[in-house]
Image (tube, grey):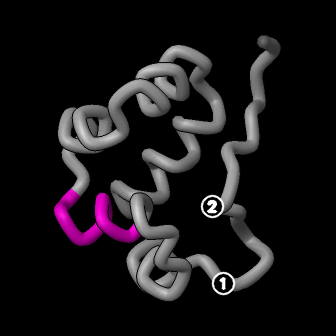
Amino acid sequence: MSKLLEFMRELGRSAELARDYEADADAVMRKAGLSEEESRALREKDYATIKRLTGLSDGQFATNHIVRAYDE
């Protein structure tokens, strides 16, 4: 699994990670070990690059919002 896909999934599962990401996305992405290309793709919502880097296709993910799998 790509590091980017793993990060996106964890972002949807972890309330703490999501809070940290909202506070300082760049720091969280660096700490997660994402490459500059992966980080830029998320920051810019570059769906074509996200699809290429993760292997996902249309309809398999949503990056314009965080889907939360936890109770707030």
Residue drawn at 81 percent across, 14 percent down = 71
Answer left or right for 68 relative to 11.
right
List x then y, in percent, for residue 60. Answer: 74, 71
- What is the CA distance from the residue labelled 2 to the residue labelled 1? 12 Å
Asked which quadrant contains residue 69, the reply is top right
- Residue type at mark 1? Ser
Q: Earlier in the sequence, mark 2 or mark 1?
A: 1
Residue under label 2 = 63
Residue 39 visible, this orientation: yes
Residue drawn at 78 percent across, 12 percent down = 72
Which residue is more in the foreground, 43 or 2? 43
Answer above or below: position of 56 versus 71: below
Q: For the N terminus, give its image quadrant.
A: bottom left
Asked which quadrant contains residue 61, the reply is bottom right
Q: Residues within 10 Å of mark 1 (few under 14, many from 20)?
A: few
Which range is magenta?
A: 35-41
Asked which quadrant contains residue 37, the reply is bottom left
List x then y, in percent, for residue 21. Answer: 43, 32
Answer above or below: position of 69 versus 55: above
- Residue type at mark 2? Thr
For discs 2 and 1, the disc positioned in front in the rendered view? 2
Residue under label 1 = 57
Which residue is more in the foreground, 26 or 32? 26
Answer above or below: position of 10 versus 39: above
